[in-house]
Image (cartoon, coloured by chain):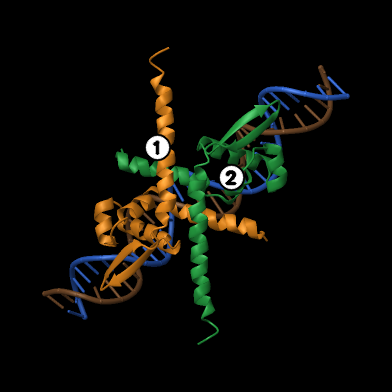
Chain colours: A orange, B green, C blue, D brown
Amino acid sequence: MPNNEELVFKIKADFLKSLAHPIRLGIIEYLKNKEASVGEMVKELRVEQSGLSKHLAILRQAGILTSRQEKVTVYYSVRDRDIFHVLRPIAEILRKKLNESNEVLAHLGRV
Amino acid sequence: MPNNEELVFKIKADFLKSLAHPIRLGIIEYLKNKEASVGEMVKELRVEQSGLSKHLAILRQAGILTSRQEKVTVYYSVRDRDIFHVLRPIAEILRKKLNESNEVLAHLGRV
DNA sequence: AATCTATATGCTAATTTGATAATATAATCA
DNA sequence: TGATTATATTATCAAATTAGCATATAGATT
C-alpha cells in the first residue's frame, strides 16, 4: 500500500519508461510534424512490423500518440505536443555534457 | 553497426531509463534543494541501503548526480539542475491528462 | 470463396532490471 | 588491534522488457 507520493513517482516512472526506448524515440521524432501509417513507418524506420506495432501500442497507452483508422490503414500521430517539452531539454543536456567532455579532451594534447 | 541517428536515440533512451524508476525520481526530488548523505536518504526515503546505493550509482553514472566524500560519509547532490527542465513538463503533462479525465467524469452524473 | 494487404496479438527465448541478503572496503573510535 | 559506522559491491533469484516468429483479424480485391 504505497502512499500518494510513491504512487505519483510510480506514474511518472511509467511515463518515462514508455519513452525510454530507441525505437520509440525514433517513432516520436518521425511523427514530429506529420501523421504516418504503420506501413510507412515499417519502411522508413526499418523495424519489424510486429515490433513496431507493439511499440506504437505502448506509446498510445501512455497517451503520447493517437491513432485513427481509415479502411485497413491505421494512422498514428502525436497526441499532445507537450511531449517535446520533455524531449528537447534532454537533447540539450546531452549536448552540454558532450561539450564538457570535449573541453576536457582539448587539453589532452597540451600538457 | 547502428548509424549515428540510432546511436543518438540509444543514448537518449539510456538517459531516460536512468530516470525511469520511482525510487530514483524520489531521490532526485529529495535532492532538489540540498545535498544529503546516503545514510540520511536511507532513513528518509525508506529504502534498503544497498538498493539505494545502486540507484545512486546509476544516477551518478548518468551524470545526474555528483557525490563528495567527507570522512566516511558520502554526500550526493544534483549535478545539473537542467534535469528539472525534463521533469517539470512531465508533471504538467500528467496533470493535464488528469484534468481531462476529470472533465469527462464530470459528465457522468448528468446524462 | 479465396486471396491479399495492413495491422494487431500471442508465444517463446534472451536479455535486462530489480530486490534482497551477504560480504567487502575504508575510515573512525575504543 | 578490534569493533563500529558508512557506503559500495557481489551474488542470487524473481520479474519485466524485448526481439522474432507465427498466427489472428478485418477489410479489400479477384
Q: Secondary structure at mark 2?
A: helix
Quadrant, the N terminus of chain B: top left
The residue most toward the bottom is B111
In the rendered view, tell whether residue B102 sits above or below residue A46.
below
Q: Nearer the viewer, residue C16 or A38?
A: A38
Picture quadrant where residue A8 is located: bottom right
Q: Nearer the viewer, residue B68 or C11?
A: B68
Q: Amino acid at mark 2?
A: Ile
Residue depicted at 61% across the width and 45% down the height:
B27
Q: Nearer the viewer, residue A104 or C21?
A: A104
Q: Nearer the viewer, residue C3 or A63?
A: A63
Q: Residues within 10 Å of mark 1 (few under 14, many from 20)?
A: few
In the rendered view, tell whether residue B1 sits above or below residue B23.
above
In the rendered view, tell whether residue B48 sits above or below residue A53.
above
Residue depicted at 32% across the width and 63% down the height:
A76
- Residue that mark 2 sits on: B28
Viewer can see residue B29 = yes
| Residue B43, disc | none
Disc 1 is attached to a residue of which chain? A
> Percent position (x, y) of residue B28?
58, 45
> Percent position (x, y) of residue D24?
35, 71
Picture quadrant where residue B12 is located: top left
In screen coordinates, is B77 left or right of B48? Answer: left
Q: Amino acid at mark 1?
A: Arg
- Residue that mark 1 sits on: A95
Residue depicted at 24% across the width and 59% down the height:
A40
Q: Secondary structure at mark 1?
A: helix
Residue depicted at 62% across the width and 42% down the height:
B33
Same subunit, tags 1 and 2: no
